[in-house]
Image (cartoon, rainbow, N blue to C red):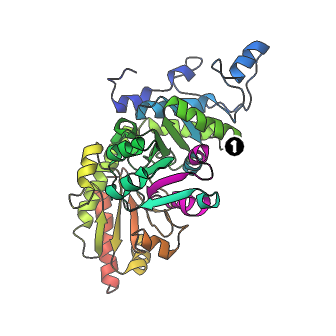
């Protein structure tokens, strides 16, 4: 596809043509673990990377490569490499570049698993981790200026959807010689392209919006080819390989990414505005709301505000226990980005690994509910919330 092709068309067509066989219009699932060669010299050239081809499934696979090619196209990247999960993508990327004595700067509001890497695992390796208040750009710039190997960002954040100015932070990171990495899972390539804003690497938990059907685990990193090649080498040796069947499901899901995300953004905005009017709701977190502290930055760097929001309810955990089971059109599960609306408290989803004290320090109340808007008719989602709130209010004084 040429550079003028729009993202919706790219999500359907890009990355697939080279992998179609026998006149098929869909990329096949190649389950073969190994790929054979009669010509020993050709085998060698492929094995050492001088010629395109596949050797062994832990390294590369045609179905997996088609998925990677589609993601790199949507993100405007030179290269991409995939992983068995989103956390594998994050941990392998960090492990590729960090060694004992290095320093990494990030924000306090990253996904709970990422936060555990920063607070538990990296310090064990004598890697200095500095976590700054999300949104305090001056503080982040000051820490980055002291020197660091990596500046790691997540915007919008999981679960409080805080916003960081990616372009500003990328300039600060590069001025200090740092590698700038952005987790773009919540935004998706449809709404935000960090590479265009100056980031070196973009990470996705493909399990979420990219796949969109809650039936395949996967992760992906994309960016400049020389950087991604180093991450690929680490992954091919350490083995967190994306399964071909999962790659096929993710690839198929991405064909409707632009349609799904468009509807999810629209639904999320209307749900957020509805929640603002509810007496039982203490606060609503969604960057599309004018009241959101990061609204102006989000408006500048995002095409739309995403399908994720969160809200805090009066009465804390007890209200959460009462409210969520009453929803008819929402899966109560630890996932997001699917076609079905999915809800859950952060204490059992994004930050289940953290203690209540750790969650409180990150500004995550125990009564916070993460709401991943699906593609259902918005009238039904609002009516569902309405009946659930009325039932809770009728049954207890909060």
**Residue 386 visible in the snapshot:** no
The spot of residue 348 in percent (x, y) is: 51, 68
The spot of residue 301 in percent (x, y) is: 29, 44
Tell me which residue sits at (29%, 46%) in the image. Answer: 304
The spot of residue 135 in percent (x, y) is: 33, 58
Q: Quadrant of residue 134?
A: bottom left
Tell me which residue sits at (48%, 44%) in the image. Answer: 203
Q: Is residue 248 magenta?
A: no
Task: Specify whether 398 is left or right of 78.
Answer: left
Task: Specify whether 31 is left or right of 85.
Answer: right
Q: Nearer the viewer, residue 266 or 103?
A: 103
Above or below, comparing residue 57 to residue 339 in the picture:
above
Task: Specify whether 251 is left or right of 164.
Answer: right
Above or below, comparing residue 37 to residue 103 in the picture:
above
* Stretch of the chain drawn in magenta: 92-121
Tell me which residue sits at (34%, 25%) in the image. Answer: 5
Image quarter in which the N terminus is found: top left
Q: Nearer the viewer, residue 75 or 392?
A: 75
Q: Nearer the viewer, residue 38 or 278?
A: 38
Q: Nearer the viewer, residue 45 or 68?
A: 45
The spot of residue 167 in percent (x, y) is: 33, 43
**Residue 5 visible in the snapshot:** yes
Q: How many marks?
A: 1
Image quarter in which the C terminus is found: bottom left
* Disc 1 element: helix
Q: Is residue 113 magenta?
A: yes
Q: Where is mark 1, residue-wise?
A: 238
Above or below, comparing residue 262 to residue 46 in the picture:
below
Tell me which residue sits at (62%, 49%) in the image. Answer: 99
Instruction: Classify mark 1: residues with Cα within 10 Å, few (<14), some (14-19) or many (20+).
Output: few
């Amino acid at each position: 596809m040429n550079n003028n092709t729009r993202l919706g068309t790219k999500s359907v067509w890009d990355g697939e043509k080279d992998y179609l066989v026998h006149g098929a219009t869909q990329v096949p699932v190649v389950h073969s673990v190994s790929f054979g060669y009669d010509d020993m010299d050709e085998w060698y050239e492929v094995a050492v990377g001088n010629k395109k081809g596949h050797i062994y499934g832990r390294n590369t696979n045609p179905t997996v490569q088609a998925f990677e090619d589609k993601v790199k196209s949507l993100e405007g990247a030179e290269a991409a490499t995939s992983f068995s999960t989103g956390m594998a993508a994050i941990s392998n990327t960090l492990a590729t570049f960090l060694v004992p004595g290095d320093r990494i700067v990030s924000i306090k509001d990253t996904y709970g698993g990422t936060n555990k890497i920063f607070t538990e695992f990296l310090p064990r390796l004598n890697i200095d981790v500095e976590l700054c208040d999300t949104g305090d750009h001056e503080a982040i710039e000051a820490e980055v200026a002291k020197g660091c190997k990596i500046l790691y960002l997540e915007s919008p954040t999981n679960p409080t959807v805080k916003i960081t100015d990616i372009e500003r932070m990328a300039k600060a990171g590069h001025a200090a010689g740092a590698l700038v990495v952005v987790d773009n899972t919540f935004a998706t390539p449809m709404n935000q392209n960090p590479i265009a804003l100056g980031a070196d690497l973009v990470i996705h938990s493909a399990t979420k919006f990219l796949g969109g059907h809650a039936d395949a685990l996967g992760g992906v990193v994309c960016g400049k080819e020389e950087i991604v090649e180093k991450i690929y080498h680490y992954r091919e040796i350490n083995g967190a390989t994306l399964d071909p069947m999962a790659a096929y499901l993710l690839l198929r899901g991405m064909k409707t990414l632009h349609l799904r995300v468009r509807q999810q953004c629209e639904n999320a905005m209307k749900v957020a505005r509805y929640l603002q009017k509810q007496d039982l709701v203490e606060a609503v977190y969604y960057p599309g709301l004018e009241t959101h502290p990061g609204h102006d930055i989000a408006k500048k760097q995002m095409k739309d505000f995403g399908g994720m929001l969160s809200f805090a309810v009066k009465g804390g955990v007890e209200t959460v226990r009462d409210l969520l089971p009453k929803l008819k059109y929402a899966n109560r599960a630890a996932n997001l980005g699917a076609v079905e609306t999915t809800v859950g408290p952060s204490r059992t989803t994004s930050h289940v690994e953290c203690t209540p004290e750790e969650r409180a320090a990150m500004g995550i109340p125990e009564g916070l509910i993460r709401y991943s808007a699906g593609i259902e008719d918005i009238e039904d989602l609002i009516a569902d919330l309405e009946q659930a709130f009325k039932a809770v209010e009728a049954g207890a004084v909060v």
